[in-house]
Amino acid sequence: MGCVVWQVIARYILGSPSTTTDELSRFLFFLGVLISAVYASGQKVYLLFIKMSGIRKINRNHKLYCDCAFSTIVMIYGGTGFVERSLHLGQISPVLGIQMGYVYLAISISGFAKAFYNIIFLIKNIKSICLNY
């Protein structure tokens, strides 16, 4: 938040926008969204299913399967491919000068964390079903 406040002050009060804080705030926002998604998975909040009216009837295990599939296919598999391509092509952020593959690595790491949470919850659900029979 400090980066954004400084960016506003630099742009509107000092009249000289800071490009470093602009890029850094974008990267931190990106990281914050991914951390929030992992936290929401850990709290068993599935945003995709909250807004859909008929989907509430679906078993909670199905929600976990869907979230785990998304985390595995899109975030881990797709994110890892994206990181490899970015590192191979040598894509570098224009202002900070860091390789973008390292920034995009947050997608894969958060995908692993989301999948880990989902697998833990699935195991707990299956154990509770087995113990009830």
Image (cartoon, rainbow, N blue to C red):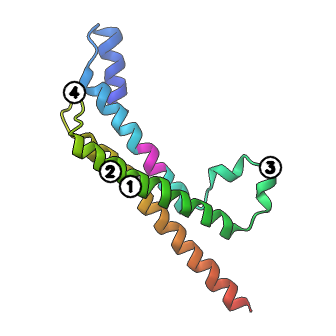
Judged from the image, the secondary structure of the residue bearing numbered disc 1 is helix
- The x and y percentages for residue 119 are 52, 72
The residue that disc 3 covers is: 53
The residue that disc 1 covers is: 108
Q: For the residues marked 3 and 1, what is the alpha-carbon distance in whole angstroms?
A: 30 Å
Assess whether mark 1 and mark 3 are in contact (beta carbons under 8 angstroms): no
- Quadrant location of the C terminus? bottom right
The residue that disc 2 covers is: 105
- Quadrant location of the N terminus? top left
Q: Earlier in the sequence, mark 2 or mark 4?
A: 4
Q: For the residues marked 1 and 2, what is the alpha-carbon distance in whole angstroms?
A: 5 Å
Mark seen at residue 95: 4
Assess whether mark 3 and mark 4 are in contact (beta carbons under 8 angstroms): no
Stretch in magenta = 32-36
For the point 52% across and 74% down, the residue is 120
Which residue occupies the extreme left position in the image? 97
Assess whether mark 2 and mark 1 are in contact (beta carbons under 8 angstroms): yes
The 10 Å Cα crowd at callout 2, few under 14, some 14 to 19, many 20 or more, is many
* Quadrant of res 2: top left
Q: For the residues marked 2 and 4, what is the alpha-carbon distance in whole angstroms?
A: 19 Å
Mark seen at residue 124: none
Q: For the residues marked 3 and 2, what is the alpha-carbon distance in whole angstroms?
A: 34 Å
The 10 Å Cα crowd at callout 4, few under 14, some 14 to 19, many 20 or more, is few
With 101 as the anchor, is 66 left or right in this view?
right
Identify the amino acid type marked 1: Ser
Judged from the image, the secondary structure of the residue bearing numbered disc 2 is helix
Identify the amino acid type marked 2: Leu
Q: Earlier in the sequence, mark 3 or mark 2?
A: 3
Identify the amino acid type marked 4: Val
Q: For the residues marked 1 and 4, what is the alpha-carbon distance in whole angstroms?
A: 24 Å
